[in-house]
Image (cartoon, rainbow, N blue to C red):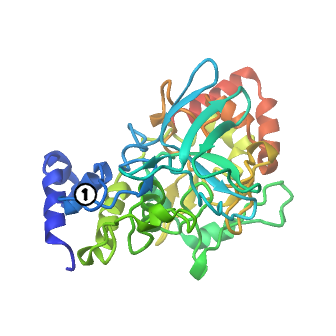
Amino acid sequence: MRVSMRRLALVLAAAAALPALALADGLERAAGKALFDRLWVAAPSSTLANDGLGPLFNEKSCASCHMGKAFAARMSVAEDGTVTARGLATRLGDAAGNGDPVYGRQIQPRAVHGLESEGTVAYSVTPGGPTVADFLPAFGAPAPATKLGPRLAPPLAGIGRIGLVDEAAILAGADPDDRDGDGVRGRARILAGGHVGRYGWKASAATLDQQIADAFMLDIGLSSPLAPHPAGDCTTAEAACLAAPDGRDASFDGEEISRQMVGLITAYLDGLPAPNLPAASEPGAAIFASTGCAACHVPAMPKRGGGAVTLYSDLLLHDMGAGLDDGVGERNVASGEWRTPPLIALSLRQGRETRYLHDGRAATLDDAVRAHGGEASRARANYDALSDADRAKLIEFLGRL
């Protein structure tokens, strides 16, 4: 097994503080949790197991964005609309998915010692409106076509279920030409190599390994064999960032974290349980189906090898209308298209700092439903037409998923 024994020993030493987890779910998951929680530092450092941060970054650890029982972002909105959040990042791009020529795909508001960050970002929300990012750039204004799209770190509880869904079932659910006339035209995102994207707000990764590697690169500035960019999201216009030391090492597959380390975190996240879900026979479940919510938030999908996976998502891209279009597209994905988010961790997301939708604009589940447009317009109209009693039953059902 090719692995840095020094680094693995340090990882396992950190995991030793969690004996119950190690006994219950194995040493691999315990090591993955230690890496997930780890605060990374800039290279070079005397602690080889921790270095490689940045040079520009959003946070120093995965756990800084994914917190609490749901492993999701936390976001508070003051009376004046100003936002305080952990786990809210700002993607950059135009409608065609091109990143900014200077600032890249994402704003990194923090930098290692001796470097200047890309600037500061302040967020605000108006009732019924989107979360707005106010960017004070350090290296001049972004390109005229560049839009700013706040992205809330999604919940990770139950994320392992996504990888269990049969790829053929995702493709079979697509209806880009709306052959059945229901107004829902979901389509699969086909990535390089012909694989179907299923992770992330825009279905940008086919595997959890790739999603983790991309997050390490964009959010923390750590390279891996799946995202071999030691300068993270720095562009050719950011010379000081590109010239900064990195933590690449032959022991880590020539990068700052090895493929095995990504795999350890994958094992940990794959094992995060979803909550116990309400029965499909409940009145709220019937209302969920009759309004049309289940057309996209499919309760169960076929599982690879047989059986079913309860997910409340079809893992397809849907045009959600102008109200949810922030102008930031991705390659072959329009700016108003979003992958249907699984709903299986909603019951774990309770409290004052819980927000919904990709940018956290919705303070309640009711707000989130009413923000739906585009292909979900018919379902939203059906929701609006419900009696107060039936609407309350539906919201109560959603709150227990």
* Frontmost residue, 45 versus 388: 45
- Across and down, in percent, residue 168 comes to 60, 73
Relative side of 380 to 272, left or right: right
How dense is the environment of label 1, judged by Cα within 10 Å: few (below 14), some, or many (20 and up)?
many
The residue that appears at 54% across and 41% down in the rendered structure is: 120
- Across and down, in percent, residue 134 comes to 64, 38
* Frontmost residue, 288 versus 199: 199
Q: Which residue type does callout 1 highlight?
A: Asn
The residue that appears at 45% across and 55% down in the rendered structure is: 56
Q: How many marks?
A: 1
Q: Which residue is mark 1?
A: 50
- Across and down, in percent, residue 285 comes to 62, 39
The quadrant of the picture occupied by the N terminus is bottom left
Quadrant housing residue 263: bottom left
Quadrant housing residue 284: top right
Q: In the structure shown, which secondary structural element does the residue marked by tag 1 occupy?
A: helix
- Across and down, in percent, residue 116 comes to 46, 50
